[in-house]
Amino acid sequence: MAKKYEVGEVVTGKVTGIQPYGAFVALDEQTQGLVHISEITYGYVKDVADFLKVGEAIQVKILDIDENSEKISLSTRALQEAPPQKKKEQPRKSLQDRVDENDANGFKSLKEKLQHWIEQSGQ
């Protein structure tokens, strides 16, 4: 690495290659990093080439630097505004909350019959 980069730093780089798993970005003459397909944008990315082109200058955020292998993980998604969260559905009620024990067709009739069945089984 020619320049010392830091995690969290935002830099401009040039896309040098596109693979099915992401895009390689040159940060300087000797340093290159990878924008993994999951870090390109929010949502599903089927094809990296739909978002990035070789030779294009892009801004990236440095997510991680592996000093041993000198691999740099980059993200363009980290520089984008997160889409609004979808309204979560109401949590499903538990079975206990959904059952009316006083329902004539439900548990009340079972409660009444249960004692009778217990008595019958003892005979």
Image (cartoon, grey):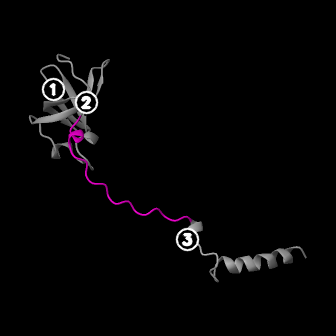
What residue is disc 3 on? Answer: 98
Q: Residues within 10 Å of mark 2 (few under 14, many from 20)?
A: few
Q: Position of residue 81 (x, y in %)?
A: 22, 46
Question: Could you tell whether 8 is left or right of 109 in the image?
Answer: left
Amino acid under label 2? Gly
| N-term-proximal mark, 2 vs 1 | 2
Query: Which numbered dot is residue 85?
Result: none
User: What residue sits 12% from the left and 40% below the top?
Assistant: 53
Q: Nearer the viewer, mark 2 or mark 1?
A: 2
Location of residue 97 by image quarter: bottom right
Number of the label disc, if any, that sits on residue 8: 2
Which residue occupies the foreground of this view, 102 or 24? 102
Q: Is residue 78 left or right of residue 114?
A: left
The mark tally for this picture is: 3
Label 3 and label 1: CA atoms lie apart by: 58 Å
Is residue 119 part of the magenta span, yes or no?
no
Disc 3 is placed on an element classified as helix
Q: Could you tell me the amino acid type at mark 3? A: Arg
Q: Residue at x 23, y 41 (%)?
A: 77
Span highlighted in magenta in the image: 75-94
Magenta stretch, overall SS:
loop
Q: Identify the residue under disc 1.
A: 27
Kindly give the residue lying farthest to the bottom in the view shown: 104
Which kind of residue does numbered mark 1 sit on?
A: Leu
Q: Is 72 left, or right, of 100 in this rendering?
A: left
The correct choice, above or below, for 83 with respect to 65 in the image is: below
